Image: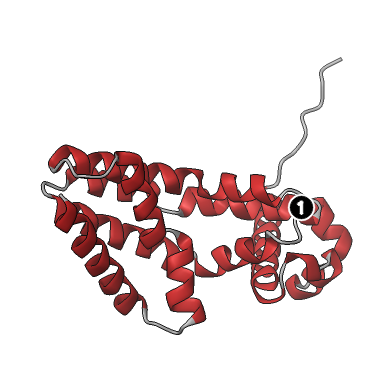
């Protein structure tokens, strides 16, 4: 007896994908505004306009949702484009300019997502692992920039120290401090961080 094939409705699949996307957007906003520990699945359901049962069926638990937010942020961060721009630079200042702009673009376009992740760390059951997963590719890009800088102009400090300084200037903490906590514009923050990095690193080379 032939096996009956399951009918897959494109409209139903599209609707399910849209519901999932709405749940993730709603959760991101709530995590960014209130913090992960103060948001429930019921809150997410209300914000998304669906039932709590639909949240679990479509996106899983609150922890599953946060994991998906992190994975989406990593994919959309633009770290590959930033790395390519850094490697294409022909002098140290251009390398730093490419890094400043690339990290600014990623932090600006994913600002709400980064806020959601940052506020989740204190109450997450494994915040250290979450942060490491969220920033692994980011750190790789900065290490690549450090190697590029040392290849173009060997400096007086070790390459690892240069990578640490690049994290200090261009890591998410610096962007958050200047823009979110002190109200700087992204343009002003980018110009300042670039100017500081150039003045410090190139003076030591």
Image check: 81 left or right of 53? left
Q: In this view, does 42 lie above or below 65?
A: below
On the image, the x and y values in percent for residue 149 come to 21, 45
Q: In which quarter of the image is the N terminus?
A: top right
Q: What element carries label 1?
A: helix
| One can see residue 94 in this view | no
On the image, the x and y values in percent for residue 12 come to 71, 53
Residue at the image position 16 percent from the left and 40 percent from the top: 154
- Given the current orientation, which residue lies at the most extreme bottom position? 183
In-front residue for pair 12/2: 12
Image check: 33 left or right of 86? right
Image check: 190 left or right of 107? left
Q: State which quadrant residue 132 falls in.
A: top right
Residue at the image position 66 percent from the left and 76 percent from the top: 33
Residue at the image position 29 percent from the left and 44 percent from the top: 146
Q: State which quadrant residue 40 falls in.
A: bottom right
| One can see residue 32 in this view | yes
Q: Is residue 66 above or below residue 5?
A: below
On the image, the x and y values in percent for residue 103 come to 36, 59
On the image, the x and y values in percent for residue 143 come to 35, 42
Q: How many labels does the image show?
A: 1
In-front residue for pair 48/15: 48
Q: Is residue 125 above or below residue 148?
A: below
The residue to which callout 1 is attached is 63
Residue at the image position 66 percent from the left and 54 percent from the top: 17
- Given the current orientation, which residue lies at the most extreme top position? 1
């Amino acid at each position: 007896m032939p096996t009956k094939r399951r009918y897959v409705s494109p409209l139903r699949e599209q609707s399910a994908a849209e519901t999932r996307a709405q749940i993730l957007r709603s959760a991101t906003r709530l995590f960014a505004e209130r913090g992960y520990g103060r948001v429930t699945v019921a809150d997410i359901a209300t914000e998304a306009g669906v039932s709590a049962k639909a949240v679990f069926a479509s996106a899983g638990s609150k922890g599953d949702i946060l994991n998906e937010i992190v994975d989406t942020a990593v994919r959309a961060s633009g770290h590959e484009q930033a790395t390519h721009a850094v490697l294409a630079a022909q002098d140290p200042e251009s390398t730093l300019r490419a890094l400043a702009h690339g990290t600014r673009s990623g932090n600006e376009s994913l600002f709400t997502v980064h806020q959601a992740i940052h506020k989740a760390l204190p109450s997450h059951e494994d915040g250290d692992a979450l942060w490491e997963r969220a920033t692994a590719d980011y750190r790789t890009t900065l290490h690549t920039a450090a190697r590029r800088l040392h290849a173009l102009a060997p400096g007086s400090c070790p390459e690892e120290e240069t990578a640490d300084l690049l994290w200090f200037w261009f890591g998410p903490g610096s962007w958050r401090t200047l823009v979110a906590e002190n109200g700087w514009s992204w343009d002003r923050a980018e110009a300042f961080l670039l100017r500081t990095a150039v003045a410090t690193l190139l003076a030591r080379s």
